[in-house]
Amino acid sequence: MTRQIHRRNAAVQVWTAYLDNRTKRHRDSRFLVHGVRPITQALAHDWPLETLLYRLGDPGLSAWAREILETSAVPAVGLAPELMADLGEKTGGPPELVAVAEYARDDLAGCELGEPGEAPVVVVFDRPNSPGNLGTVIRSADAFGASAVVVAGHGADQYDPRCVRASTGSLFSVPVFRVPGPAEVLEFRDRQVARGVPTRIVGTDENGERAVFDEDLIDATILVVGNETSGMSAAWLAACDRTVTIPMGGSASSLGAPSAAAVALYEISRQRRTFAR
């Protein structure tokens, strides 16, 4: 029989804090996962989950939630509906299932991606302001076959529930690393080159040297996307081997970081599919 909680206690207070308290998430190396696809993806990729929290009472749980609880080895705890509502995302009624997940290693030091002859793509997001935007970039990186995402500087937290939700579960399939600035990425680039994986750093910038579709992006690429408000920092501009721009029509002044990342990642994918044919 699973444990059940009907009144707010210390454990519930801790779980609730993970919703919007970044310091407590980091202290405990724990975060919350909401939604059918993110929870399903976390389980599919064997992400370490500490607890599955489920809603007690009526209405009953869906077939999906019951199957998760019956087939997963993760400990389950039933919570009264009002307690589950406190752990939800403030939209709709109490969620039927919320997972408490553990942090993954996010240190880029020593990381190696790909083998000689392969051309991995890594996306760097410089100081992202919005957890939702970061989650969207992680989702695009997954969709277009990138090997990793790197969050540079003091920016949004990849374990913020808004980021986890926006990634639609891609957080659990694409490694996400954090670095203070360009130095760690330059060291990673040098390690890759030394391993026989020629790698260039290409930044997206409205004043880029050439259009993204005119740049050869077949080889291993570190794609840098700037901050939503100010673009790439001077340090990142200096770190880039090349900057590219995305030609636009209409009256829009810019695409925004998530859209720019998706367009550039699509172009990298397009070039590689074309070359393969």
Image (spheres, helix red, strand yellow):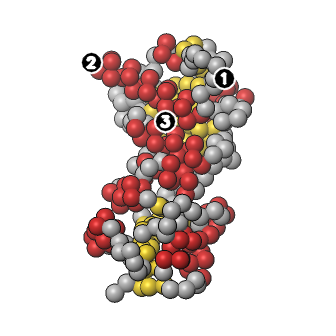
The amino acid pointed to by label 3 is: Val
Q: Is residue 15 visible?
A: yes
Which badge, 3 or 2, is on the more N-terminal residue? 3
The residue that disc 2 covers is 277
The amino acid pointed to by label 1 is: Ser
Front of the two marks 1 and 3: 1
Which badge, 1 or 3, is on the more N-terminal residue? 3
Residue 77 point in image, percent of width and height: 43, 79
Q: Is residue 138 left or right of residue 14?
A: left
Which badge, 2 or 1, is on the more N-terminal residue? 1
Please identify the quadrant where the N terminus is shown.
bottom left
Q: Residue at x 63, y 46 (%)?
A: 130
Q: Which residue is nearer to you in this view: 237 or 142?
A: 142
- Tell me how far mark 3 sits from mark 2, CA to CA: 23 Å
Please identify the quadrant where the C terminus is shown.
top left
The amino acid pointed to by label 2 is: Arg
Asked which secondary structure carries label 1, the reply is loop
Asked which secondary structure carries label 2, the reply is loop
Q: Are marks 3 and 2 in contact (CB under 8 Å)?
A: no
Residue 106: mark in rendering: none
- Tell me how far mark 1 sits from mark 3, CA to CA: 26 Å
- Tell me how far mark 2 sits from mark 1, CA to CA: 35 Å
The residue that disc 3 covers is 122
Query: How many residues crowd mark 3 within 10 Å: few (<14), some (14–19), many (20+)?
Result: many
The residue that disc 1 covers is 253
Q: Which residue is nearer to you in this view: 143 or 90?
A: 90
Residue 61 point in image, percent of width and height: 35, 72
Q: Residue at x 63, y 23 (%)?
A: 252
Question: Is 10 placed above or below 107 here?
Answer: below
Q: Are marks 2 and 1 in contact (CB under 8 Å)?
A: no
